Image: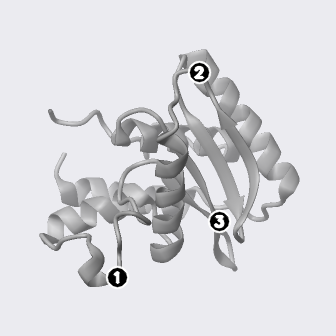
Amino acid sequence: MSLESDIALIKRQEELLQFSKFDEADAWALGQSMRALAEKKKLPLVMEIRVAGRPLFYTALPGTTSENPDWVRRKVNTVMRFAAASYRVGLQYRLSGNAFDASRGLNPIDYAPAGGGFPIHIKGTGVVGSVTVSGIPQREDHGFVVEALAAFLNVSLKEIQLPPADD
């Protein structure tokens, strides 16, 4: 797929994977389902769900490293700055040819335009938080979050899943 079609599909994911409400109980239920899915797939992921700056769910599975929580922090910052999936932000920068750097006020120490961060968007309110993972290649990080959110929100994954990367 082209960058343009990936970006369009991620925008569609963001439109469909929205919540009517999201509270601490929802964060816990989503986090538990994500952990179970990651364990079933034997994925080495750090997972965090955060709303209004508050961490509501956090877990680290076997195989993760001390780098993964920092990647999560940087992806969360990207989601909250752009109110968009961190993977889409990275793809948009790549497509534009513009650097994602400190000259734009985006210090790579604090921001990561890489897959794995997805906005928690409440219909009628906007983006209030993020669901973020780190531990596998960025396109797969993004795909894992989309899969988990689609299952939680009863949205068909088939229509919105990114295809495997063209390597």
Residue at the image point whose x is 65% and y is 65% from the top: 129
Label 3 residue SS: strand
Given residues 97 and 17, the one toward you in this image is 97
Name the amino acid, label 2. Pro
Q: Of tags 3 and 2, which is closer to the observer?
A: 2
Given residues 126 and 137, the one toward you in this image is 137
Q: Which residue is mark 1?
A: 105
Q: Which residue is mark 3?
A: 129
Q: Please give left or right for residue 92 compared with residue 9 in the image.
A: left
Given residues 13 and 142, the one toward you in this image is 142
Q: CA distance from mark 2 to mark 1?
A: 35 Å
Marker disc for residue 62: 2
Label 2 residue SS: loop
Q: Of tags 1 and 3, which is closer to the observer?
A: 1
Q: Please give left or right for residue 40 compared with residue 162 in the image.
A: right
Name the amino acid, label 1. Gly
Residue 43 in picture, x, y percent from top left: 52, 23
Residue at the image point whose x is 48% and y is 75% from the top: 81
Given residues 107 and 21, the one toward you in this image is 107
Label 3 vs 2, first from the N-terminus: 2
Residue 17 in picture, x, y percent from top left: 58, 56
Residue at the image point whose x is 26% and y is 70% from the top: 100
Label 1 residue SS: loop
The residue most toward the right is 25
Residue 62 in picture, x, y percent from top left: 59, 21
Q: Residues within 10 Å of mark 1 (few under 14, many from 20)?
A: few
Q: Where 110 falls versus 71 (above or below)?
A: below
